[in-house]
Amino acid sequence: MKENVTASATKLFTTCLTKPSEEEDESIDLDTEDDAIQNVASSGDLLQNCFAAMVDTLATHNGEAIAQIKIFVSELRRIALLWDEQWLGGLEQLISNMMKRLVQVSHIDPE
């Protein structure tokens, strides 16, 4: 068990916490916008890999808690999406009612 914890901690350290060598830093050239966008994308990939390594490390210690947290997060995302959909539906209904009233008002002849 202790070897497994040490191995996962080592994997986490090598994946996330090591800095690139200075040679790699000098080779990065951000002269163009495309290079900057690609660098940001690779940073996002690095963060995703780091997050996955942290989750794997934590899962070795308490896999049941990690599984429950994943379910909790997915339910929070589902609820948030439903809340946004409710707002969108309500706003669409209000806009529809407003447009109908504008049409009614514009067809009234002033006497």
Image: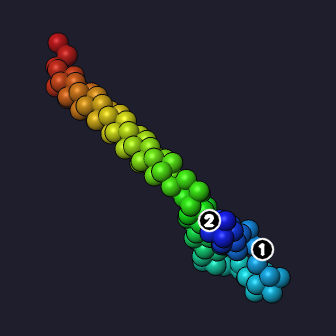
Q: Can residue 88 be seen in the rendering of this structure?
A: no
Q: Secondary structure at mark 1?
A: loop
Residue 109 in the image, given as x and y percentages of width and height: 16, 20
Identify the residue position indicated by label 1 in the image.
19
Identify the residue position indicated by label 2 in the image.
1
Going by the numbered disc 1, the residue's amino acid type is: Lys
In this rendering, position of residue 86 left or right of residue 28: left
* Residue 51 vertical placement versus 30 (above, below): above
* Label 1 Cα neighbours within 10 Å, binned few <14 / some 14-19 / many ≥20: few
Instruction: Say which of 58 and 35 sits in front.
Output: 58
Q: Secondary structure at mark 2?
A: loop
Going by the numbered disc 2, the residue's amino acid type is: Met
Q: Residue at x 56, y 61 (%)?
A: 60
* Residue 14 vertical placement versus 109 (above, below): below
Residue 74 in the image, given as x and y percentages of width and height: 41, 48
Q: Residue at x 66, y 70 (%)?
A: 3
Instruction: Say which of 74 and 85 sits in front.
Output: 74
Q: Residue at x 45, y 47 (%)?
A: 68
